[in-house]
Amino acid sequence: MSSTPAIVRARVWLEQGRADRAEPELRLALAENPDDSTSHALLALCLVRLDRAAEAVEEARSAIHGAPDAAMGHHALAVALEARGRIDDARKAIDAATAIDPRDADTWALRGQIELHDRCWQDAREAAERGLAIDPEHVGAANVRARALAQLGSVAETEDELRRTLARDPENATTHANRGWWLLQRGNVAEAGESFGEALRLEPGNESARSGLVESLKARNRLYRVMLGFFFWMSRLPRRTVWMVLAGAFLLPRVLRRIAEQAPALEPLVGPLTFAMVGFLYLTWIIDPLFDASLFLHPLGRHALTARERRRAAAVTALVAAAVTAAVVAWLGGRREALILALVFLTFIIPLSTAMSVEGRTRRLVSSWVAVGLAVCAVIAVGAGLVARQEGREAWMAPAAFCGLVYIAGVFVMSILSNRWAMSPRPD
Amino acid sequence: MGRDDTRIRALQEAVERSPDDPRLRAVLAESLLEDGRAADAEREYKAALKRSPGDDDLTLGLVRALCAQGRQETALPILDAHVELSDPSGELLLEHARLLLAAGRAEDAATQYRRAVAADAGLADPFLARRLKVRAPGGAVVDGKVRAGIEGSPDGDGEAVEAERPKISFSDVGGMEPVKEQIRMKVIHPLKNPDLYKAYGKRVGGGILLYGPPGCGKTHIARATAGEVDATYLAVGIHEVLEMWIGQSERNLHAIFAQARRAKPTVLFFDEVDALGASRADMRGAAGRHVINQFLAELDGVQSSNDGVLVLAATNAPWHIDHAFRRPGRFDRVIFVPPPDREARARILEILCLGRPAGEIDFEKLARRMEGYSGADLKAVVDIAVEDKLGVALESGRTEPLDTRVLMDAVKRVKPSTAEWFSTARNYVLYSNEGGLYDDVRAYLSLDT
């Protein structure tokens, strides 16, 4: 392995997690020796931490080109590909790394991380255990194992793993954050908040701990706790099962109607059950931003929210308020069009919330334009609909209906897309 | 007619219209020199120097014009005199080193080379360094920077780092009054009134850690502190200390402190101290821990007294520094250096516009628009405005003075660079403000939790 003063300095910065400072040192090392595979591999790891995964892939490939039989380049490539969301390719790269150096616990921990990303809990557990067999004190592998066990529902083993990992390294922010999520999953909100607080004290930039803290603050509310339990349950399911659950939710009203046709005694239950299910599904869309908005008044919560979360919470709350106002007008004034407006406001939350929360530049751009397009459709549909109600202007009904249909279809597609993106949070 | 001819013709016309503008002449001379018309360039540089005597850039241009004509023997005395009289730029020193070497004055050339690279690491020229026998560890060129000779090493006959006596003082630092006051109390008064402090049983010594967003004047105020007490100033960065050989980094640190003790009174300034004093909890390797232990031992003056050595350090990342550094006697005063306030911004802008053609400029109005801008950002704004005006001057052929409007346009194109730092600092204030360490940042951000 090559070593120059620049690489030594880069390693010092990397040890401290200072990728921004390590990058120029590695560029300097590469200026001196452009073919140095160690520098290329380290630079790839730096770039991933700097959220420049596309460049990182190129650097990792240069590292492999320079030294194809060194595990470091393949490891760096796997890290970069995982960051790009290319899980299958990342798995191939990490396979190459483990084939070259099967005694590296770091590589097995990364393998476990990749499997976690792909919701393959058992594979993640096995990879982490192989890493721990090599280095029983490897905190990264232990954390992967704890997370896999938690998702597999092994309560005692998860608690045991987290306790042992914290005993070995009580100042590890990632472990504290993982413990926080585990406690939150178990419904122990107060202790979860303490764990997230400790993780943030140790590493204030730890995103997992920050979002965990926000969730633990919101979970003080019983309704939110119930919904969080549902989200945790969904997060444990394999991807295919999640889709089956969603499809089931869409088909359930029809199934209920069929049952009611066969057994008319159940007929009175169909309406309320369908309404409850649609309400529950709708709640999964709005509960997160609505409770984010409730943190605006919390002394720590309002600072813990990111700027994007604050914006989304404010926008969704405004739409809900507008919908309620329109509904009240419809109810008091008997104006049916106000009810349609309320429905538009409520349904528009889906594309808007997606555009304001989705990860990845391309996805954000696409969803933003779709949201703008749907807003235009909604305005035309409502406006043309109002005009069409006037005598002699019935011709306006056609564009109103067309735009209305486009709007409904758009909202439906966005809800599917949003779920799809949520299940692969790191974009290509 | 070529593009260069057109440009030169336009510049000549501009100079005819504004014969007293040395900058315009400098641009013309540079174009002439690029066009191979060294004698004409020499004439223009000389004319410009008459109007702006002692200017580094013009002198350098003249020297280059003379060298282009093969008249090194004329150029050398000009540079000899210039470096004697002024505080020359790195580029000028490098040119001087080259001419001295050509004249057979190798020792003088090596000295000037070291000064040049100390002033600007980017000027390092490995080829010239080899010819001057400026080699490791007696001033080796490592990573584009002179790494100085190490005391006690077999072939090290130089000093650990380049020393200087800064000519600037606090009056040259715009704003930052609270920071200056704290440094006065901690550093300057004790040094000037040692008996008084002794009478009150107040221990003299300990260091100051300056932290804050980049580009806000931490390094500048450290130099000004040395100027204020007329002390030797030693600036130390990661490049001067960290080495790949085991134990060498610790030896480098020891040599730097030894040099500071010899040259007292000394302001020993560690830039980016987080690189050398990072939290040991963050480190996997033992080598980094050894460097930290050595650093702590030197700060404590375990082997030799640090009397007369004032240790200042700067960092953009105070949260990465090992807690042990904050104990009494070490960096026991931690000072937040915020971006300049409105008054300071106006003053800095005023200073930056000095010596440039300027019309009516409403510095107060500009300063109001530049909340959160660092000193470096302010300089970027003025540079952009100057470039804009220079472009107009080249087209019109007459000097175009800077005004509020062009500066305001430039403001729109420069975003404040401190935002990223504050977004990180905010997390430390919210979640890791043990002992109120970041209370100053909390107050600056008006965070109420």
Image (spheres, coloured by chain):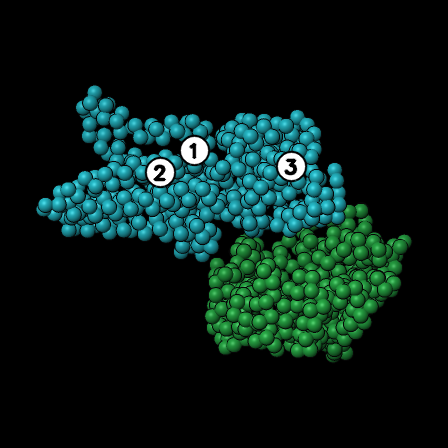
Chain colours: A cyan, B green
Residue identifier under label 2: A414
Q: Are marks 3 and 2 on the same chain?
A: yes
Disc 1 versus disc 3: nearer the observer: 3
Tell me if residue B415 can be seen.
yes
**Of helix, strand and loop, which one carries label 2?**
helix
Judging from the image, mark 1 belongs to the subunit labelled A
Instruction: Give the residue drawn at x 68%, y 30%.
Output: A68
Callouts 1 and 3 close, C-beta under 8 Å: no
**To which residue does mark 1 refer?**
A233
- Secondary structure under the numbered disc 1 in the rendered image: helix
In the image as oriented, which residue stretches furthest toward the right? B154
Instruction: Tell me: residue A194, above or below residue A259.
Output: below
- Residue A62 numbered tag: 3
Instruction: Where is residue B19? Give x, y as percent.
Output: 61, 77
Are the numbered discs 2 and 1 placed on the same chain, yes or no? yes
Q: Chain of mark 2?
A: A
**Mark 3 belongs to chain:** A
Badge 3: few (under 14), some or many (20 or more) residues near its Cα, within 10 Å?
A: many
Residue type indicated by callout 3: Ser
Residue toward you, B23 or B112: B23
Of labels 2 and 1, earlier in sequence is 1
Looking at the rendered image, the quarter that the N terminus of chain B falls into is bottom right
The label nearer to you, 3 versus 2, is 3
Q: Which residue is at a point 54% across and 56% down the rendered structure image?
A: B420
Q: Is residue A308 above or below residue B99?
A: above
Relative depth, front residue between A327 and A147: A327
Q: Residue at x 54, y 71 (%)?
A: B397
Q: At which x and y percent is residue B366?
A: 49, 71
Question: Looking at this rendering, what residue extends furthest in the top direction?
Answer: A262
The residue located at (39%, 42%) in the rendering is A367
Nearest to N terminus: mark 3 or mark 2? 3
